[in-house]
Amino acid sequence: MGHIGEGALLALRGSSVGVGTDIGGSIRIPAAFCGVYSIKPTHDRFSYRDTANTNPGQNTYPSSVGFLSTSVDTLKLVMASVLSTQPWLRDPEVVSIPWRQEMVDSTLERASPDGTANDQPPLKIGVYWTDGVVGPHPPILRGLRTVCNAIEEAGHKVVDWSPPSQSTAKRVHLAFLKADGAHDIHKQLNLSGEPLIPELESAFQLRDPINLLEYQDLTIQGRYYSAAYSDYWNATADGEDGQRVDAVIMPVAPHAADRNALLPDSTLRANPAKFGQTAYTESINLMDYSVAVIPVTKANKDIDKFNKDYKPLNKIDCENWEAYDADIYDGAPVGVQIVARKYEEEKVWAIAKVVVAILKAAGVH
C-alpha cells in the first residue's frame, strides 16, 4: 500500500494532512488501516504534473492525486485551497472545475448540524455488503452495520446495493496495470538494482506487453462495465420515492490491518489473502468515481468472533476467512469508503461530513 507511511504518520499525529496517489486503493487503504480520513478524486481534478508515477503512458485508467488527513474538515480546506490556484492553467490535463461550494451547501442543507434528516429530502445511501467474491471479516461487517444503522436512525434512507459484479471491473483494471509487461516498473528498479518485494514478484514479473488489439478490447470492456454500473445507479430513481442514490458505503478492504504484517517473520508471504484483496477499491478506480474514507470503529476480539458457520464463496474467500484471527486484528482501525460519481468531490465530502456528524451524535466517534 503505497502511502501506508503517510497514514501511519497521520495516525500518530506527526502531521495533519498528506498528499498521495491512488490507482487501486493507495490512498484509501492506508487511511482505513490507520484510522484517518482521505479522499480519492476523479483523476484529472487535481494536477499530476511533475509527480512521480509508474507507467505514466497508461492513461486509460490513470491514478488520482488525493489527500489524507486527521479530520474531515481538513480535506475540504486542502481541496478548496488547491483549486483556488486554478491548477488547470498550469496543467492542461486538469479539468477547469473550481471548488463548487454550492454543491457542498445543497448537500449539507439536507441534514441538521448533528446529521439528522430535516424538512429537506433525506440522503439516500446504498450499502454494498460484499462483492460476492471475498466476504468481509467480522470487524468490517460490524463497521458497515454501525454506519448504516446510525444513518437510518438519523432519518436518512439506506438501501442495499447490488451493482454489476465488481470482479469484472477488477479484472479489466488489473489488466491495464500489467499492460506494459511490468517494463516501466523494472526500468525504475534497475536504476538502483532494487528487487521486487516478494509480494509482487508473481504479479509483476517481466513479460511481453499485451498487443494493441487486446488493449483496445479491454478498453471497450471497461466502457461497457462503467455504462452498466451507471445504468444501475440511475435505476435507483425508479422506486416509489423517485430518488436516486446519493452515494454508496462499502468496505475499503475485506479485512482490517493485520498486526503480523509489520513483523519481520510475517506470515503475509505464506498467506497473501491477508493483505492482497483490492477489488473493493480497484473496481472504483475503473469508473474513476469520487471517494471519501472515514474511520468508524476498531476491531474488538470480544465482539468480532470467528463465525464457524460461515460458508466461503470460493477458494480465495476461504483463504481470507481462515486468515481471520480475532486476537491478531484486535484494536485495528475499521473504516469505510463513501463512493459518489465522477467529479463529485464536493458532494462526497459533504456526505462524509454528515455521516461523521451522525456517528458523533450516536456516540460512535
Image (cartoon, grey):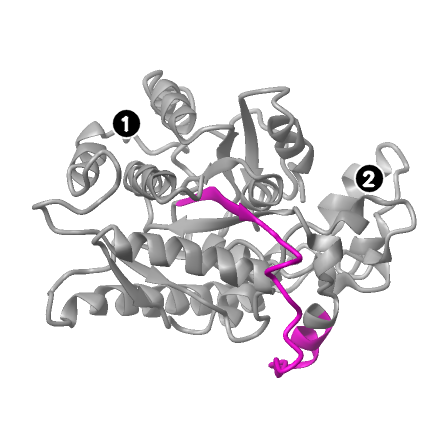
**Between marks 2 and 1, how big is the CA–CA gap?**
38 Å
Q: Is residue 59 above or below residue 8?
A: below
* Count of all numbered marks drawn on residues in the image: 2
Near-viewer residue (232 or 148): 148
**How many residues crowd mark 2 within 10 Å: few (<14), some (14–19), many (20+)?**
few
Disc 1 marks a residue whose amino acid type is: Trp
Specify which label sits upstream in the sequence, 2 or 1.
1
* Nearer-the-camera pick, 281 or 109: 109
**Residue that mark 1 sits on:** 99
Quadrant location of the N terminus in the rendered image: top right
Residue 326 point in image, percent of width and height = 70, 60
User: Residue 198: x percent and y percent?
Assistant: 86, 53
Identify residue type, mark 2: Leu
- Corner quadrant of residue 232: bottom left
SS at mark 1 in the image: loop
Contact between marks 2 and 1 (CB within 8 A): the answer is no
Where is residue 240? Give x, y as percent: 10, 71
Residue 330, numbered circle: none
- Residue 54 shown in magenta: no
> Label 1 crowding class (10 Å Cα cut-off): few <14, some 14-19, many 20+?
some
Label for residue 189?
A: 2
Residue 264 horizontal side relative to residue 322, left or right: right
Above or below 32: residue 319: below
Magenta stretch bounds? 291-319
